Image (spheres, helix red, strand yellow):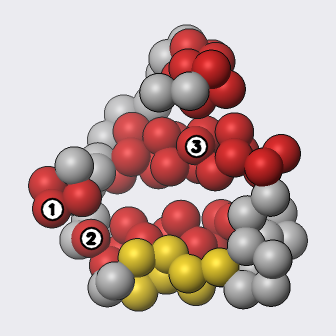
Amino acid sequence: MNESAAKVARKLSTMPVRVSRQMTATEYQVRVAEVLNLFDIEAVGDETGVHYGGEGVALEDQPLLAAIRVLIGRRFGVPDDLQ
């Protein structure tokens, strides 16, 4: 885990979030892409993963991407086939 991912994980560990239901791997990838699009990061999720358009994810967006994946995983659980 890189330094920024470790910082994100520490911050997120203080937020109380409970799992509401388990998603499939495809649902998880689509949800991640939907949230990234809210931040003007062009992404599409499908059964093969999250695909980025344009320039992809810039280095400065990596902590945001890590935080989104952690929060979605904590809220909906990370599908077993993605762990």
Quarter where residue 58 is shown: bottom right
Is residue 28 rendered to the left or right of residue 5? left
Quarter where residue 56 is shown: bottom right
Q: Residue at x 83, y 45 (%)?
A: 60
Q: Label 3, on which residue?
A: 66
Can residue 20 be seen at all in this image of the molecule?
no
Gap in angstroms between the C-alphas marked 2 and 3: 17 Å
- Which of 8 and 71 lies nearest the eye of the viewer? 8
On residue 33, the disc is: none
Dots 2, 3 in contact, CB < 8 A:
no
Q: Amino acid at mark 2?
A: Ala
In the rendered image, the vertical position of residue 8 relative to residue 60, given as above or below:
above
N-term-proximal mark, 2 vs 3: 2
Dots 2, 1 in contact, CB < 8 A:
yes
On residue 81, the disc is: 1
Gap in angstroms between the C-alphas marked 3 and 1: 18 Å
Q: Position of residue 71 (x, y in %)?
A: 51, 41
N-term-proximal mark, 2 vs 1: 2
Q: Label 2, on which residue?
A: 25
Is residue 20 rendered to the left or right of residue 37? left
Helix, strand, or loop for circle 1?
Answer: helix
